[in-house]
Image (cartoon, rainbow, N blue to C red):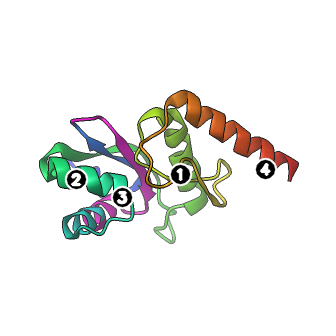
Amino acid sequence: MPNPLDTAGVYAIVNTVNHLLYIGSAEHIATRWKVHVRDLQKGGHHNVDLQRDWNEYGADVFCIEVLTTIELHPRTWKADARNLRILERQFIDEHLDHLYNIMAPTPDGVKTEAIRPRYQKPWSQKRAISQYLAQKRRDEQG
């Protein structure tokens, strides 16, 4: 049976104590997971909230779950990066109330935008949706 991490797709790093998630996407999930673990073990992960909880709870309470996979292009063996980012954003939008994520791809997968300020506990779902809709209105106007 193939390893589900040896694929392209969207994944979640799950804190099994407080149930917060860090959602990301990668062409090779296993490699990306190794980079996350290395950065967390060295104390230099880019997400300070995830790093703080890793330090507090320890590595044993974190696991990775594959949320969805996508096929690689048969000639290039590459994933469609935009499609990956769109899928990542869809999962982020579904879990806004319990995320470590600070940044996320825009819904069209083209750019990246803030979904909550740095150094702040995850927003309540109501606040996150309010912020998302306000940003969406600004984007449509400007």
Q: Disc 2 on helix, strand or loop?
A: helix
* Residue at the spot of label 4: 139
Three-letter residue code for mark 3 = Val
Three-letter residue code for mark 1 = Pro
Q: Earlier in the sequence, mark 3 or mark 4?
A: 3
Q: Residue shown at 19%/65% (left/top)?
A: 41
Name the foreground residue: 130 vs 15: 130
**Side (left or right) of 136 relative to 127:** right
Q: Disc 3 on helix, strand or loop?
A: helix
* Residue at the spot of label 3: 48
Q: Which mark is residue 104?
A: none
Disc 1 residue crowd, few under 14, some 14–19, many 20+, Cα 10 Å: few
Q: Earlier in the sequence, mark 1 or mark 4?
A: 1
Res 38 → quadrant? bottom left
Q: Residue shown at 32%/53% (left/top)?
A: 50
Q: Earlier in the sequence, mark 1 or mark 2?
A: 2
Name the foreground residue: 59 vs 55: 55
Disc 2 residue crowd, few under 14, some 14–19, many 20+, Cα 10 Å: many
In the rendered structure, are the residues bearing label 3 and label 2 in contact, judged by CB atoms less than 8 Å apart?
no
Q: Which mark is residue 117?
A: 1
Q: CA distance from mark 1 to mark 3?
A: 12 Å
Is 22 in the magenta? yes
In the displayed image of the protein, which residue is found farthest to the front? 119
In the rendered structure, are the residues bearing label 1 and label 3 in contact, judged by CB atoms less than 8 Å apart?
no
* Residue at the spot of label 2: 54
Q: CA distance from mark 4 to mark 2?
A: 35 Å
